[in-house]
Image (spheres, helix red, strand yellow):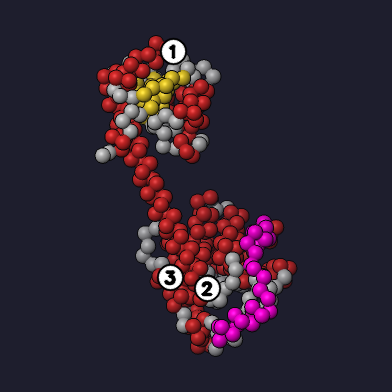
């Protein structure tokens, strides 16, 4: 059974200020198996869209109070009506009017005089196409939601292995998105940062416990192994077609590079380091400094900011440090929004003992 068979009598909203235009259209559609409601102008039509929830809207262009273009724009501003088919019926056949119709959000248009015998077939074709597009979009959204959940869980798995506590991932990812906004990234790239940055340390999954969970200072050889987590993270996320996972791959590889070229794994310098990696480096370090760990007390915000300023031009991009200081009040709001649970001294001792 196809989508149209499931909806035997679709509801069509006809919008036209002239009764003699609506009447033959109503007759033709009812003969084709449609149910019909009518509106005399765009404002009345908008009320009926919300009340009756039609399956298709056919609207004239030139009407009092609200014309067909404005009706399209009004409907499209509501996310729930994104896939509602809107067909403009007009005698206007110039290119400018047609472009305006599509820009306003029209699905298609029919030109007057209308072929009444074909109208029902045309509406069913438009309705079938709209429902197919909606089904595909919903499937794509579900795939994206699943992918984001996998990313979140992999990021959490890496943090658990590293003995991180609380909401480090949430904080640093929101810090990253906020810093990206301050740098001028568009909303899409800010969202990429928010969703991809939790994967920055995913490569730690491949680091041996004796090194990753060592409570004391690492030896030179141990630190050499620890540094490979950037390469391991890059390998885990490599050759992915998704822009989201390609961004996570870039961040995993570059979030330990330094502005002065003394970072790892590739010793990149200044703007050779991808912007996403430079942003996540700063966000990650600030959260690490100001968070309590079983092996250390949190630094004060003032001391952490002073350290970041001190490392401007060596560890960090100087422009990002400047922007970070400018948006510090917003950073602190995020920090307050995702607080870590309080750890007692006994809790800290127990965690430290478990990691030995």
The answer to whether 14 appears left or right of 31 in the picture is right
Query: Which residue is denoted by mark 1 in the rendering?
Result: 18
Badge 2 marks a residue whose secondary structure is helix
Q: Earlier in the sequence, mark 2 or mark 3?
A: 2
Rendered image quadrant of residue 322: bottom right
Please report contact status of discs 2 and 1: CB closer than 8 Å, yes or no.
Answer: no
Q: Secondary structure beneath disc 3?
A: helix
Report the front residue among 127 and 245. Answer: 127
* Image location (x, y in percent) of residue 50: 49, 30
In the picture of the structure, the residue carrying the numbered disc 3 is 234
The residue carrying mark 2 is 160
324 vs 74, nearest the viewer: 74
- Membership of 242 in magenta stretch: no
Between disc 1 and disc 3, the foreground one is 1
Is residue 325 depicted above or below 165 in this figure? above
Image position of 143 (left or right of 153): left
Q: In what quadrant of the picture does the C terminus appear?
A: bottom right
Where the N terminus falls, by quadrant? Answer: top left
The residue drawn where x is 32% and y is 20% is 30
Judged from the image, the secondary structure of the residue bearing numbered disc 1 is: loop
Mark with earlier residue (1, 3): 1
Label count reads 3
Q: Nearer the viewer, mark 2 or mark 3?
A: 2
Question: Vertically, is 191 above or below 257?
Answer: above
Per the picture, the main secondary structure of the magenta-coloured stretch is helix
Q: Residue at x 59, y 80 (%)?
A: 351
Q: Is residue 345 magenta?
A: yes
Magenta stretch?
Answer: 330-356
Which residue appears at 35% of the width and 38% of the height? Answer: 131
């Amino acid at each position: 059974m196809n989508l149209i068979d499931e909806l035997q009598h679709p509801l069509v909203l006809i919008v036209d200020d002239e009764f003699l235009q609506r009447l033959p259209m109503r007759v033709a559609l009812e003969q084709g198996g449609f149910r019909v409601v009518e509106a005399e102008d765009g404002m009345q039509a908008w009320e009926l869209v919300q009340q009756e929830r039609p399956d298709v809207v056919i609207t004239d262009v030139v009407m009092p109070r609200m014309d067909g273009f404005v009706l399209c724009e009004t409907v499209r501003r509501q996310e729930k009506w994104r896939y509602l088919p809107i067909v403009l019926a007009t005698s206007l056949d110039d290119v400018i009017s047609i472009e305006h119709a599509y820009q306003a959000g029209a699905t298609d248009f029919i030109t007057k005089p209308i072929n009444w015998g074909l109208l029902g077939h045309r509406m069913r074709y438009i309705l079938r196409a709209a429902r197919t597009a909606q089904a595909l979009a919903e499937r794509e959204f579900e795939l994206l939601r699943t992918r984001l959940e996998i990313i979140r869980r992999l990021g959490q798995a890496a943090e658990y292995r590293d003995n991180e506590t609380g909401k480090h991932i949430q904080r640093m990812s929101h810090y990253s998105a906020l810093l990206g906004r301050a740098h001028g990234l568009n909303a899409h790239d800010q969202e990429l940062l928010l969703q991809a940055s939790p994967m920055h340390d995913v490569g730690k999954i491949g680091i041996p416990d004796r090194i990753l969970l060592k409570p004391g200072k690492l030896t030179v050889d141990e630190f050499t192994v620890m540094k490979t987590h950037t390469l391991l993270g890059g390998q885990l996320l490599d050759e992915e077609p998704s822009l989201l996972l390609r961004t996570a791959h870039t961040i995993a590889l570059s979030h330990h590079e330094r502005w002065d070229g003394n970072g790892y794994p590739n010793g990149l310098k200044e703007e050779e380091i991808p912007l996403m990696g430079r942003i996540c480096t700063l966000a990650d370090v600030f959260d690490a400094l100001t968070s309590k760990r079983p092996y250390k007390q949190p630094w004060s915000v003032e001391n952490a900011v002073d350290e970041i300023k001190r490392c401007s031009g060596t560890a960090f991009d100087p422009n990002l440090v400047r922007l970070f200081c400018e948006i510090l009040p917003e950073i602190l709001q995020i920090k307050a929004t995702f607080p870590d649970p309080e750890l007692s001294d006994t809790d800290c001792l127990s965690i430290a003992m478990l990691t030995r």
